[in-house]
Image (cartoon, coloured by chain):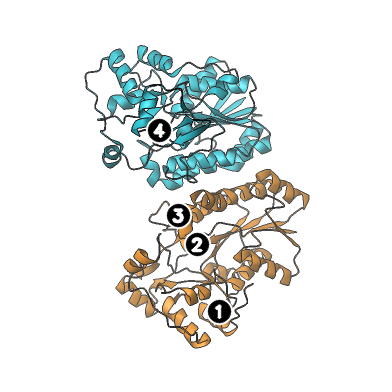
Chain colours: A cyan, B orange
Amino acid sequence: MIALLGASGYIGQAFTVELERRGKRFIALARGEVDYTNFDALLTFLRRTQATFLINAAGYTGNPNVDACELARADTLLGNVALPQTIAQACRIAAIPWGHVSSGCIYSGAKVLSESNGRVVKNMMIDSVRAMVEARSPSIRGFTEEDEPNFTFRNPPCSFYSGSKALAEEIVGRFSNCYIWRLRIPFDQYDHPRNYISKLLRYSKAYDNVNSISHRGDFVRSCVDLWEIEAPYGIYNITNPGYISTREVVDLIRTKLNPARDFDFWESDEHFYREAAKTARSNCIMDSSKLLSSGVQIRPVRKALEDALNNWATVVR
Amino acid sequence: MIALLGASGYIGQAFTVELERRGKRFIALARGEVDYTNFDALLTFLRRTQATFLINAAGYTGNPNVDACELARADTLLGNVALPQTIAQACRIAAIPWGHVSSGCIYSGAKVLSESNGRVVKNMMIDSVRAMVEARSPSIRGFTEEDEPNFTFRNPPCSFYSGSKALAEEIVGRFSNCYIWRLRIPFDQYDHPRNYISKLLRYSKAYDNVNSISHRGDFVRSCVDLWEIEAPYGIYNITNPGYISTREVVDLIRTKLNPARDFDFWESDEHFYREAAKTARSNCIMDSSKLLSSGVQIRPVRKALEDALNNWATVVR
């Protein structure tokens, strides 16, 4: 039996669908019934149900966006740091493995191969880097699981949200029976306030940058696959291979959805941060080769995006 | 056997002295030998040594002062939030009670009795409040353990340090076998960078405000007393009864130590924050009547301060 935490959230819902599709026995813990933030309650639940695996899709992401975490610091830390630690320690005592939904937003920028060693560029808006990214230069590389996160409390600046997620990885990473699944900017065919496509359709202006992103269905499928194929515990970047610019996504939206609006972009980082955002945003390129090497299959980013747009449904689920 | 965490710190050292004085068997855990931030290692240690009580005097206070916590956010959260939670959960599994050194700095200001209900005044620099405080008005009251902390992430502004300490209380307070001992501005007769008297002797200018403060020896004695007399678990304000202004402390220092320097004060909060401090400071009056009602004896603040100055020793211990 699998215990699923955060089942009502955007990622938790997708886990529910995926576990049902696979015919897996699972219990979606509702906090009203079992307060899983309470160590005793969680441990008692895990023992009573003889859970064999736990999925933590609960967390505090901020509403409507990460800016909210700058103010809701207690809830951000309780949801993203204290809860994962409680889960890690309860799973340790119950002797069961588990998986934690983390985030790639603990990185900023990309790596640029120069001579022999990869140099880290934190700001992809720099013209030279941007040109290389847009030209799909083979010198541009994503961050691997070995790279130290660079958009964290230890490597400021960072958003409070990113800081909390990185701190959780530091804590949870010390436990040997845990998957750390890194999601980045989820999207799929279902309109939803957290869907990247929906966001771009609703923003008055888009923030032009380059990112690795995660198809929501592909993400949860990969998470469960890793567990099922008994891949080694540890960190996995779970983004659709490759990267894509906001302009490319917008071009695809224009072509596929033909929306009755035009799209406009913030002229510069300066404009964006002055007008639309309170805290720094992570934009980054991730390397998903560890996931692929482990034997899990996941579509390239453009393929996943085209598929989402080809099947675009405005039904909120 | 008592397990003492943070024995090398300023408060931990005093616990060492107090436990030795009482002839208590204890082990001061050195992080180099037992990494008590590691849940497994701590739990194994507690079981192996059959510990009957744990004292957590470890934490991250910032060096030279709390301003450092604003930058060292990861270490502040690991030391002041993640560690207490790990201890709480390990002590729960080991089924032993424990005590946590918390801080009164999660409050700002004082309470003013107006008609029937106590109004909270956050800034004691306000002239009307200041006058009442200096006149020892019976309408001025300290915060009790029932009062919600008001200098926290949930009630900003606060310092990052205070935010972390309040969050720890929120987490640890859910465990039923735990003392939360609130310290405020420690001092005693031994010169030390964390001793309030030493600080006042070294500051170029002093920040004039009013506080409840804790004699270090009285504090640890009270903590151990609470456990020994089997007082109910929960929060205790452990400050010497009463409150004192910086000017009064400085006057006492002048009289008792006759130092070869003059003392100067920041003209205003504005000056202090512009010139000498990065983050907001907590200044507050605490009510220690719960401690006294429990049967623990502790000297009034002026008595404890005079005693420290009468026995002033410049030997660092």
The reply to whether label 3 and label 4 mark residues of one chain is no
Within 10 Å of disc 4 (Cα), the crowding (few <14, some 14-19, many 20+) is: many
Q: Chain of mark 3?
A: B
Q: Tell me the CA gap for discs 2 and 1.
A: 22 Å
Horizontal and vertical percent position of residue A7: 49, 28
The reply to whether label 2 and label 1 mark residues of one chain is yes
Q: Amino acid at mark 2?
A: Glu
Q: Which residue is mark 1?
A: B304
Q: Which residue is mark 2?
A: B145
Q: Amino acid at mark 4?
A: Asn
Q: Nearer the viewer, mark 2 or mark 1?
A: 1
Residue B296 appears anywhere in the view: no
Which quadrant would the N terminus of chain A be assigned to in this image? Answer: top right
The reply to whether label 4 and label 1 mark residues of one chain is no
Q: Chain of mark 1?
A: B
- Which is more N-terminal, label 2 or label 3? 3
Q: Are marks 3 and 4 in contact (CB under 8 Å)?
A: no
Q: Which residue is mark 3?
A: B70
Q: Is residue A213 above or below residue A256?
A: below
Q: Amino acid at mark 3?
A: Glu
Q: Which residue lies most toward the top here?
A: A310
Q: Is residue A213 above or below residue B197?
A: above
Q: Secondary structure at mark 1?
A: helix
Within 10 Å of disc 1 (Cα), the crowding (few <14, some 14-19, many 20+) is: many
Horizontal and vertical percent position of residue A65: 36, 36
Within 10 Å of disc 2 (Cα), the crowding (few <14, some 14-19, many 20+) is: some
Q: Secondary structure at mark 4?
A: loop
